[in-house]
Image: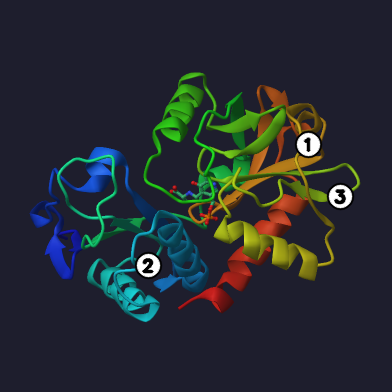
Amino acid sequence: MTRIVYLNGEFLPAEEAKVSIFDRAFLMGDGVYEVTSVLGGRLIDFDGHVRRLERSLGELGIEMPMSAEELLGVHKELVEKNAIVEGGVYLQITRGVADRDFLMPEGLKPTVVLFGMHMNLVESPKAETGMSVGVTDDQRWARRDIKTVQLLYPSMAKTAAKKAGFDDAWLVEDGFVTEGTSNNAYIVTKDGRIVTRQLSSDILHGITRAAVLKMAKEAQMQVEERPFTIEEAKDAAEAFITSATTFVMPVVKIDGAEIGGGKPGPVAKRLREIYIEESAKLAS
Ligand code: PDD
């Protein structure tokens, strides 16, 4: 089946979708993106993703090129055209095309790209075994709350972690964990409290994070939004990550140290179940 993508108002076979070499995302990393998961052919928490998109665009002074409703329509059509039952939709909006200049040109027509991905989100093998993370310095820029396409450092960190035998890396700044290379990071203390770093420009404001914390509170679990160290994490009862493409995923090894006996713990498992169950309520 030909992969159909969306580019600036048109649905096209992937090989026909071409973007200018003068696109500001290509030259300057001047663009933002979103990844929305698809379950049962429906988009999970599109409202959350589109709100964050509007915020990212606003922070960079890029106009929202169409309404949220129109954007939802494009997402749905893409899911349908590619018969995506489970996976995700990647959306990228760049400032547009202009001759190379450090000064951001005004009034450009944003480039809008969407493509779909087929993925096993629910029956993911790592959900059963848990994943391992290495630890590395957080050397990203200081506006991690903006979901920009300049992903070089996270990509370097993940690649180095893989080479060292880990599944991913947790990033540490001033002695405290910020987040994973492409996910938010959590521990569960021995007395059952879920700990994750508070929102600020130090981390991406995960859409899955917001939903999972709400569901945890509704299930009477204790949530603490504060920084934690790698030492505290290694001594924790459990650890896990969240993102649109992993949902809730247990972490069973941090920098070689086993967490919770090296097996996914009950809190992460329960939260994963709740999220998958409740995601139907967030679907459009
Ligand atoms: N990444 N933190 C970072 C640095 C991320 O890149 C992501 C998402 C998250 C989780 O956000 P959300 O729950 O909204 O997916 C946290 C996406 C999945 C990606 O880059 O593919």
Q: In the rendering, at what x and y percent does residue 127 appear? A: 59, 47
Q: Residue type at mark 1: give it.
A: Gly
As helix, strand or loop, the secondary structure at mark 2 comes to loop
Residue most extreme to the top: 164
What whole-number distance in Å separates the C-alpha atoms at marks 3 and 1?
12 Å
Dot 3 or dot 1: first in sequence order is 3
Residue 141, x across and y down, in percent = 50, 36
Q: Does residue 119 appear anywhere in the picture? A: no
Q: Does residue 106 sit above or below 141 in this rendering?
A: below
Figure label count: 3
Task: Tell me the tag on residue 192.
Answer: 3
**Disc 2 to disc 3, C-alpha distance:** 35 Å
Residue drawn where x is 84% and y is 43% of the image = 189
Q: In the rendered structure, which disc, 1 or 2, sits on the residue that comes first in sequence?
A: 2
Horizontal placement of 75 versus 20: left or right?
right
User: 251 or 92, which lies in front?
Assistant: 92
The amino acid beneath tag 2 is Val
Q: Residues within 10 Å of mark 2 (few under 14, many from 20)?
A: some
Q: Residues within 10 Å of mark 1 (few under 14, many from 20)?
A: many
Q: Does residue 68 lie above or below 156 as drawn? A: below
Task: Identify the element where label 1 is drawn.
Answer: helix
Label 2 sits on residue: 85
Q: Where's the N terminus, which quadrant? A: bottom left
Q: Quadrant of the C terminus?
A: bottom left
Q: Residue at x 15, y 59 (%)?
A: 2
Residue topped by disc 1 = 260
Proximity of marks 1 and 2: CB atoms separated by less than 8 Å? no
Please state which of residues 281 and 156 is positioned toward the viewer in this rendering.
156
